[in-house]
Image (cartoon, rainbow, N blue to C red):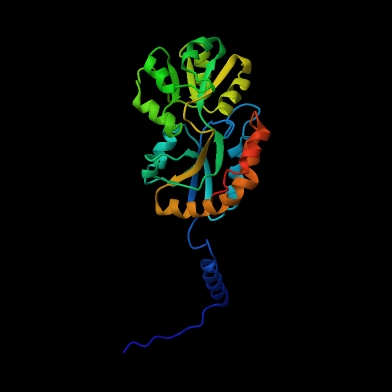
Amino acid sequence: MVIGYWRPARPGLLALSILMALLAALPGQSQAKETLIWLVRDFPPLNIFYGPLRGQGAIDRLIPELIAQMPEYNHQIMHVNRARGTQMLQDPEVFACDPTLLWTEERAKHILFSIPTYATPSNGVTINQKDHALFAPFVSEDGRLDLAQVLNSRKIKIGIVAERSYGPVIDNVLHQYPQDNLVLHYGNAAVGSMLQMERAGRFEAFISYWPEARFHAQQQSVPLNELEFYPVKDVPKYQFAHIGCSNSEQGQRAMDMINREMRVLRSTRLIGFYAQWMAKREEYLQDAKTFFADQ
């Protein structure tokens, strides 16, 4: 027969044991916080990486407020280009979110999307004013450019950002019509670089948001009256963007929190952050009253 003997613990050891048990019971103490990576790219006026306005973009200002509402995570902000960001969101080993994504059917196969978070004037085509006559045959009476006919003409080269979605109408045109006159840009600061390339004669136009092209023109001291922006035929006035996260259990938990917070922040904060960059600010604020009315 084995007989065990109970011995009282030393007071100091007993106190330490109790303290450790209490700490283990506290929320968040039993395991380290997960790290959520925010994938951001040089995408003015949403994210601004360079110059005197660095960090003052609409999403630059939103992210700290959203992070403050998600203390369950450690947060890391990582600068990427569009191609790298897409690759990381589709990597099952990465836990990340991108705050500036357009929804597409192909992306939705691999990425979780939030509720709509902001509306931007839709993508269009920016040209040099001196090339107006070259594009005139493709412009309708209401000032919209027939992008399909431009590509079919095979006379005009157009710059685009690799892996970027421009919305369903423009994406379909870019995929269905001749590709030989498209110039893909894979690097950082893509739209700023394409503006320089266009002015150097590498191509005649590029596709982007007008607020984005306008920002880069101002940063490069390009007079705005030397540029023309054409909305594209059949493209709506505004496009809605989302936050996209890794399609995993981690991503779904984060997305539940993001949707909860963005139902408030998108109207109370983000609309104002973005409106300050609009050439027609009052018109945008008036339109914004109906952006989320049916949601």
107 sits to left or right of 63:
left
Where is residue 87 drawn, in percent x and y? Answer: 39, 37
Q: Quadrant of residue 154?
A: top left
Q: Residue at x 37, y 39 (%)?
A: 106
Where is residue 69 drawn, in percent x and y? Answer: 59, 53
Q: Is residue 99 visible to the viewer in this orientation of the structure?
A: no
Q: Looking at the figure, which quarter contains the N terminus?
A: bottom left
45 sits to left or right of 186:
right
Observer-nearest residue: 257 or 174? 174
Q: Residue at x 60, y 25 (%)?
A: 215
Q: Residue at x 65, y 39 (%)?
A: 286
Vertical placement of residue 276 versus 111, above or below = above
253 sits to left or right of 177:
right
Where is residue 98 drawn, in percent x and y? Answer: 49, 41
Vertical placement of residue 147 versus 80, above or below = above
Q: Residue at x 49, y 27 (%)?
A: 188
Q: Is residue 139 visible to the viewer in this orientation of the structure?
A: yes
Furthest residue toward right = 282
Observer-nearest residue: 171 or 294? 294
